[in-house]
Amino acid sequence: MAAPMTLEPQQFPRARRFAAELRCRYREAGTQVWYEGRTLNISVSGVLFRAEQILRPETAIEMVVTLPAILPGVRAPEIRCRGLIVRKPSETGGERTPILAASIAGCRIVRGSRA
């Protein structure tokens, strides 16, 4: 009799992360209060950011990341995302600002308009 076949979990490559320190705002989905933050790195599947307010893992969030302005007189474009807090990394290097990681479930780019 043949040995039972074992299936290994399929390994997917991790999405490429881009170091980017960008202004962001975030809030728990469905609430009115926005908090300020700064991204540390971002990928197509998630974002690591310094946070003003800690949110628990599994919290649904909305986030707006402001991209650098390209043209004078035109507002900087924004990436508007929805996602989920996936972890609260441990503090490193004596930093006091909390760091959160969020998955990105969907996003859209909102082009800048005339200021």
Image: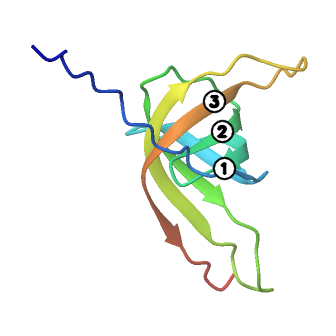
Residue 6 position in % (x across, y down): 26, 21
Does dot 3 land on a helix, a strand or a loop? strand
User: Looking at the figure, which quarter contains the C terminus?
Assistant: bottom right
Are dots 2 and 3 in contact, CB under 8 Å?
A: yes
Mark 3 = which residue? Answer: 100
**Residue 72 image-quadrant placement:** bottom right
| Furthest residue in direction front, as rendered | 1
Does dot 2 land on a helix, a strand or a loop? strand
Residue type pointed to by label 1:
Arg
Q: CA distance from mark 2 to mark 3?
A: 6 Å
* Residue 50 drawn above or below residue 76: above
Q: Nearer the viewer, mark 3 or mark 1?
A: 1
In the picture provided, is 86 more to the left or to the right than 97?
left
Crowding near pointer 2: few (<14 within 10 Å), some, many (20+)? many
**Residue 48 marker:** 2
Crowding near pointer 1: few (<14 within 10 Å), some, many (20+)? some
Are dots 3 and 1 in contact, CB under 8 Å?
A: no
Residue type pointed to by label 2:
Leu
